Image: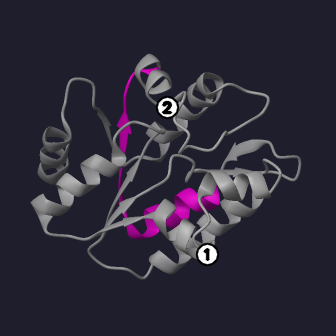
Amino acid sequence: MNIALIGPRGVGKSKVSRKLSKTLNMPVISTDMIAVYELGGISIPDQIKKDNGKWNNFRKLEIQILENLSKSKNIILDCGGGILFDVDRDGREFYSEKKVKLLKSFCTVFGLSHNTEYLVEKVINDPGRPVLSDINSYREILERRLPFYQMASDFYIPVEGLDPKDIAKKISELI
C-alpha cells in the first residue's frame, strides 16, 4: 500500500510524512526532492526563474515523476502543493485530471487542510518557496485550489489544532 499526502503549501505534509514514516516503518519520498534531483540540483525557485516564471516544464516533470513512482510499493509520498495542477500554453493553471488519476492509481490519497490565514502567514515571505504567479496573490491561488485538494482526496483531514504526530496517528488509524 502506498500513501500520498496532498494539500497546500505550509499545511505540514513533510512533517506529517516523517512522523507517519516512523509510525508505519515506510520510507518517505518527496516529489519536490525528486524534482530537484532531476533538475540537476537546481532549486525549484531557481528553475522557475530560469524558465522566466513559467511552470510548464516543472508541471511536466511532475507527471514524469508520478509515472516513475507508480511502480513503487509501500511508500509515503510527500507531494508538492501543486501536484494536482497543470498549466496551459498561456500559463494558466488548471486541475489536472491526468495527474490525479495517475496518483490515485497507486496511492491512497490523504488531503490535509488548514485555514487560509494560517497558510498565507506561514508561506508569504518564505524565500524557499517559488512565486506561483506574478498576477495572482498566494491567497487567490490558495482559495482557488482548496476545493480540488478535497475533491482528489480519499480522506480529507482538517489539521487545525493537531500536531504532526496526532495527524500521523489519525492517518494510520484510517488505513
Quadrant of the frame with the N terminus: bottom left
Q: Are marks 1 and 2 in contact (CB under 8 Å)?
A: no
Mark with earlier residue (1, 2): 1
**Is residue 52 shown left or right of residue 83?**
right
At a point 31% along the width and 79% down the height, the residue shown is: 73
Work out whether 116 lies above or below 142.
above
Q: Which mark is residue 123?
A: 2
Relative image position of residue 56 (x, y in whole percent): 76, 57
At a point 11% along the width and 59% down the height, the residue shown is: 23
**Is residue 148 shown left or right of residue 20?**
right
Residue 157, image quadrant? top left
Relative image position of residue 146 (x, y in whole percent): 52, 31
Relative image position of residue 10 (x, y in whole percent): 42, 36
Instruction: Look at the image and say whether residue 11 sits in the magenta stretch.
Output: no
Give the Cα distance between marks 1 and 2: 25 Å
Label 2 amino acid? Val
Relative image position of residue 145 (x, y in whole percent): 58, 34
Residue count near mark 1 (Cα–Cα under 10 Å), binned few <14, some 14–19, many ≥20: few
Count of marks placed on residues: 2
At a point 18% along the width and 48% down the height, the residue shown is: 168
Q: Which element carries disc 2, helix, strand or loop? A: helix
At a point 48% along the width and 39% down the height, the residue shown is: 9
Residue count near mark 2 (Cα–Cα under 10 Å), binned few <14, some 14–19, many ≥20: some
Quadrant of the frame with the C terminus: bottom left
**Is residue 104 shown left or right of residue 169?**
right
Residue closer to the observer: 114 or 49? 49
Work out whether 38 lies above or below 81.
below
- Residue 149 shows in this picture: yes
Q: Start and end of the magenta stretch?
A: 97-116
